[in-house]
Image (cartoon, rainbow, N blue to C red):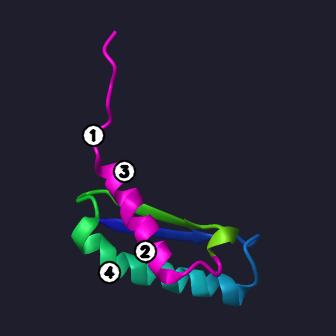
Amino acid sequence: MGIGITVSGKVGNAVIRNRMKRRFRELARLVLPERGIAGADHILIGRQSGIERDYALLRSDFEQALVRVGKPQRRDRP
């Protein structure tokens, strides 16, 4: 299981971007072993709205996203 973290320069100064990356690394450390998709690479992209987001909400969003991604895609038959 791999992880990639990116936070654009548009988000803020280096201090803010590094803080977001640290939060993402901690989220990945706590959540991915339990809920991550085996054999998949997980990419986290920092956005402006996530700068001051409550950590509990950020974790909840991340866990919900992993659940959505892990579900099999429904395909309609012709």
Q: Earlier in the sequence, mark 2 or mark 4?
A: 4
Q: Amino acid at mark 2?
A: Arg
Q: Are marks 1 and 4 in contact (CB under 8 Å)?
A: no
User: Which image quadrant for residue 9?
Assistant: bottom right
Using the image, tell me which numbered label, if any, was put on residue 30: 4
Looking at the image, is 77 positioned above or below residue 21? above
Which residue, given by chain and number where applicable, does mark 2 sit on?
59
Looking at the image, is 78 positioned above or below residue 68? above
Residue 59 lies in the magenta-colored region? yes
Q: Are marks 4 and 3 in contact (CB under 8 Å)?
A: no
Task: Provide the secondary structure element on which disc 3 rests.
Answer: helix
Q: Are marks 2 and 4 in contact (CB under 8 Å)?
A: yes
* Front: mark 4 or 3: 3
Task: Provide the secondary structure element on which disc 2 rests.
Answer: helix
Which residue, given by chain and number where applicable, does mark 1 sit on?
72
Q: Residues within 10 Å of mark 1 (few under 14, many from 20)?
A: few
Q: Camera-side residue: 31 or 43?
A: 31
Q: Residues within 10 Å of mark 2 (few under 14, many from 20)?
A: some
Which residue, given by chain and number where applicable, does mark 3 sit on?
68
| Residue at image location 37% in from the left, 66% down from the top | 63
Q: Which residues are magenta?
A: 51-78
Left or right side of 71 for 3? right
Task: Provide the secondary structure element on which disc 4 rests.
Answer: helix
* Front: mark 1 or 2: 2
| Residue at image location 34% in from the left, 20% down from the top | 76
